[in-house]
Amino acid sequence: MEKAVAMNILTRDEGTGKEYARIFRLLSAAKDEAHKLKLQNLMHLTNMALLQVVIDWDGIDPERELDVNLEKLIGTKTQVAMKDAAENLVLLDCH
């Protein structure tokens, strides 16, 4: 009997980790702005979008992987996304 092997193969329509991190940061910024403007529906939508980015980023199937701690995973991805942003930050000395 053959065993099926799960492989993470990057296809044309799948993003890289840096692309997912960028999308995560953009959605986080949109969520923050929605919070400032007290736009509850937009905050809810950005929360859903952030969750979907994390699910896609890790290739999780929530229907099959019920034991995944999504809150912890979101926290981890937040750290990765913000670390990636800090590494790409360039400071200019104007003096």
Image (spheres, helix red, strand yellow):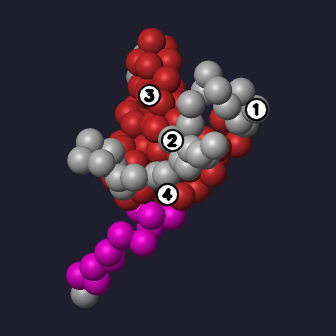
The first of marks 1 and 3 along the sequence is 3
- Residue 86 part of the magenta-drawn span: yes
Q: Position of residue 56 (x, y in %)?
A: 46, 38
Location of the N terminus (image quadrant): top right
Can you give x and y, in whole percent of width and height, for residue 52 in the image? 48, 30
| Amino acid bearing label 2 | Gly
Packing grade of label 4 (10 A; few <14, some 14-19, many >=20) is: some
In the foreground, 41 or 65: 65
Are dots 2 and 3 in contact, CB under 8 Å? no
Label 3 sits on residue: 49
Residue pointed to by mark 4: 82
Q: What type is the residue that disc 3 sits on?
A: Ala
Report the residue at 56% width, 49% height from top.
Answer: 5
Q: Amino acid at mark 1?
A: Asp
In the depicted view, which residue is nearer to us: 35 or 49? 49
Mark 4 vs mark 3: give the one in front.
3
Residue found farthest to the bottom: 95
Give the extent of the magenta segment: 83-94
Residue 87 locus on image (x, y percent): 42, 72
Indicate which label's residue lies in the foreground, 1 or 4. 1
Per the rendering, the mark at residue 59 is: 2
